Amino acid sequence: MEYDVRVLRGHLRSVYDCAWNPSWDRNLLASVSEDGTARIWDTSKGSVDHPVLRHCIQKDGVEVPSNKDVTCLDWNCVGSLLATGSNDGCVRIWKTDGRLVSTLHQQKGPIFSVKWSKCGNYILTAGYDQTTIIWDTTTGQSIQQFAVHNDVVLYADWQTNTTFASCGADHRIHVCRLGENEDIRTFAEHSDAVNVVKWCPQGQLLASCSDDNTVKIWSMSRDRCCHDLHGHLKAVHMIKWSATGLGTSNPNARLMLASASFDSTVRLWDVEGGSCIHTLRGHTEPVYSVDFSPDGRHLASAGEDKFVHIWSTQSGQLLHSYNATSRMYEVQWNAKGTMVAAGASDGSVIILNLRSMGIIKNHVE
C-alpha cells in the first residue's frame, strides 16, 4: 500500500546527508549521521531490518566505535557499493547489505567530500588536511594526493574519469588531472570560501557557490568566469544542475542551475543567458539543500525553518510544503522522480511520496 509520508527512525543525532541508490528498481536510501553511523534503508519496509554501518577504529588491538561524525556519502554508478567519509579521517566502502569492503585511510582529519568516478574505478576525497586524494577502489590504495589548496578543501567533483575540480576555504578552485603534479587550471575570482563546485551534465561548464554571496560559472577555455551571478544577499550554501540539455535524457529542456542561500531564498538560473529565471521565496531561514527532479520540472528545497518545499521550475510556483519537527539538512529525489528524501537534525529521515500525494502525475515506470 502506498504512503504519502514515511519517517525513518534509527539515527540518534543529526542526519547530514542522504542519497538514493541509483539502481532504477531499488528502493534503497543511504544516510549518514552525527551519531557515527551510516544506514541503508529499504524505504518500502520503513525503519525495520535495515543495515547499520558502524564506523569503527582499532584501539589497543580491539575494534571500537570511532564516535566521529559521518559527514558524506556517494553510491557508485551501478548502486552496488556505497562510500562514506568520516571525521575520523577514513573513507569506507560498503556493500548494500552493510558489509564493510575496505577502509581507506591517508588523510589527516575530517573528510568533507567523497565521490565515485564515472567508471567506478576511483574514489575522490577532500578534507580538512587541505588535500584531495584519488583512490583505487580495487586495491584500496591511494594513487595520487594533491596539495594545491592553502586551506580546508570543502568539496570536489569529477569532470571525467581522471579530471576533477576542488574548492575550499582559501577562496580558490583548482582543476586537477590524475598523473599531473600541478593543477591544470586555477580559478580565483571568489572573495570568500567556496562551498561547492559542480560540473554540468555535459562536463563543459563548472559552477561554484561561495560565502561571498555569488554563484559563478566557469569554462576550461576561459581564464575568467563566463557568468558572475549576483542576487543572493547572504552566503550561497549549495548549487545543483538540472539533468537537462544535450547528452541527457531530457535533451530538449534547457539547462538550469539552482542555488540555495542563507538569505532564505532559492534561485533558478538560466545558464546560457546568465540570468535569474525565478527567485523562490517560501523559506524563512537559511536554505541548506536543493535538488532537481530527474526531468527538471520540479525542484525540492530544505532548510533551517524545518520545511521541505516542492516547486515548479517552469512557473516558480510552490506546489507542496512539508513541515518537519527539526532542521532539514539534505534533500534528494529518487531516480524515478516520484519520491523525495530529506535528512533532519533530530536524526530522522523523511520520505515524501509525491506520486501518492498527486503532486507528481507524469512519471516513467
Image (cartoon, rainbow, N blue to C red):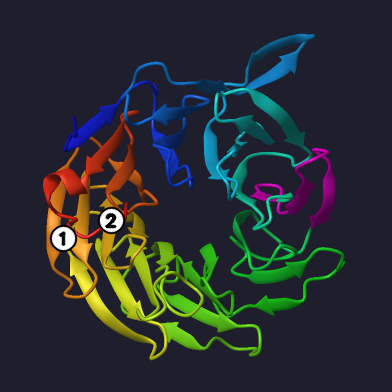
| Whether residue 75 can be seen here | yes
Graded by Cα atoms within 10 Å as few (under 14), some (14 to 19) or many (20 or more), the crowding at tag 1 reads some
Q: Quadrant of residue 278?
A: bottom left
Of the two numbered discs 2 and 1 in the rendering, the one whose residue sits closer to the viewer: 2
Q: Is residue 11 above or below residue 18?
A: above
Q: Position of residue 242 (x, y in %)?
A: 39, 69
Q: Tell me where the magenta segment starts and ends, as one range.
A: 123-146
Q: Which residue is mark 1?
A: 282
Q: Which residue is mark 2?
A: 301
Q: Is residue 265 above or below residue 307?
A: below
Q: Indicate yes or no whether the magenta region holds residue 282.
A: no
Q: Position of residue 234 (x, y in %)?
A: 34, 67
**Label 2 element class:** strand
Along the line of sight, the residue nearer the viewer: 186 or 117: 117
In the image, taking residue 283 as reference, residue 269 lies left or right, namely right
Along the line of sight, the residue nearer the viewer: 275 or 255: 255
Q: Position of residue 243 (x, y in %)?
A: 42, 68
In the image, taking residue 58 as reference, residue 250 lies left or right, namely left
| Residue type for callout 1 | Gly
Which residue is at a point 33% across and 34% down the rendered structure image? 345
Which residue is at a point 81% across and 63% down the rendered structure image? 178
Label the magenta part by its dominant secondary structure: strand
Quarter of the image with the N terminus is: top left
Instruction: Identify the mark nearer the N-term, 2 or 1.
Output: 1
Graded by Cα atoms within 10 Å as few (under 14), some (14 to 19) or many (20 or more), the crowding at tag 2 reads many
Q: Is residue 248 above or below residue 260?
A: below
